[in-house]
Structures are given as structure tokens and as C-alpha cells.
Amino acid sequence: MSMQIEYSQENLVKLKRIEREAYINTNYMQMQHCESWSDVASYCECSLENLHIAFINDGYIIAACHDGFMEIVDLASSGRNMNLFEAWRFLRELGKPMFLDAREKTSYRLIKGFERRGELHIIEDTSHDWDGETFHQIKCTVAADPWLRALP
């Protein structure tokens, strides 16, 4: 069952609200100017057909499908209430190697948690500074269903 959202005006408003709340007092808001889902796809440098978005609790994951890989364009939450299983399930649905730029204080912790639990395999992890904060450029793959390992 796909977690992909419907591209409605209501969901665009929700996306922009979450981004505003998640990135308050930072320069990381990039989609506030978007008036349509085509604008969001353009920001993500992909077609609307290659744009994948899931809302998970008070957050979202935005992914853009490129040739042979997925770019996680943004992973944000307006609170601390993202369901980790649902986030991992959406990443697994994407089914391709992934690249993302993860903020050390936030999404990097989530990705490292997935790695510790065997849900993701990090292939590359290089850090850099952006606007005074540490970010990690990560290349990773989703592991086979780790929840099945516990079954007899």
C-alpha cells in the first residue's frame, strides 16, 4: 500500500506549514514560494511523476526519482513525533539507492538510528558546513525488511 500523498491544494498548504514550523529561525525554508505541485517538482529538479511525498505524523519526506537513484530532498518534522516505522517503510517503498543531505542535529540522527537497527546501510557519509551547521551528504540503501528477521 503506497504512502504517496494526493497532490491537492490542502496538502500543499500542509507541506509549507510543516516546513515553516520545522525550519523556524533558519535559512533552510525552500518551498514557501511554491504555488503548485509543479513548483515543488521544479524545486526538486524532477517531474511531477518522479516526485514522491509522504506525510508521517507531523512531518514529511520528499523524494525525487532520478536515473537509478532517489534523492531525499527533504525530511522534516514540525515536532518530535515522526513514526520511525512509517518513515522507514516509505523509504523502503522507494526501492532504490538514496542520496540525502542530512542536518546533524535532526535528520542525521534519524538516519543513523535506522543504520544502528539494520534498516539502512550507509555507503558514504561526508560532512560539510552550511550556514554554520554541520550537514552530512549520505549515500545509502534500504535493508531488506529487518522486522522479518525476528520471525521463526
Image (spheres, rainbow, N blue to C red):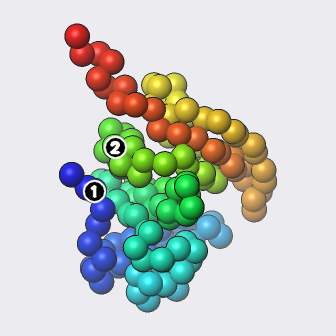
How many C-alpha atoms fall within 10 Å of the one at disc 2: few (<14), some, or many (≥20)? some
Q: Is residue 52 left or right of residue 137?
A: left
Query: Residue 54 occupies which quadrant of the picture?
Result: bottom left
* Numbered disc total: 2
For residue 3, the mark is 1
Q: CA distance from mark 1 to mark 2?
A: 9 Å
**What residue is shown at x 75% (from left), y 62% (from top)?**
131
Q: Name the residue beneath numbered marker 2.
A: 89
Amino acid type shown at disc 2: Arg
Q: Tag 1, which secondary structure?
A: loop
Amino acid type shown at disc 1: Met
Find the residue positioned furthest to the front. Answer: 68
Above or below, comparing residue 116 to residue 140 in the picture = above
Above or below, comparing residue 115 to residue 80 in the picture = above
Q: Position of residue 143 (x, y in %)?
A: 45, 32
Q: Position of residue 136 (x, y in %)?
A: 69, 46
Q: Position of residue 62 (x, y in %)?
A: 45, 62
How many C-alpha atoms fall within 10 Å of the one at disc 1: few (<14), some, or many (≥20)? some
Query: Residue 88 occupies which quadrant of the picture?
Result: top left
Q: Earlier in the sequence, mark 1 or mark 2?
A: 1
Q: Is residue 152 left or right of residue 121?
A: left
**What residue is shown at x 43% (from left), y 89% (from top)?**
35
**What residue is shown at x 78% (from left), y 53% (from top)?**
129
- Can residue 109 be seen by looking at this rendering? no
- Can residue 5 be seen by looking at this rendering? yes
Name the foreground residue: 125 vs 50.
50
Q: Tag 2, which secondary structure?
A: helix
Q: Is residue 136 left or right of residue 81?
A: right
Q: Position of residue 55 (x, y in %)?
A: 33, 60
Q: Are marks 1 and 2 in contact (CB under 8 Å)?
A: yes
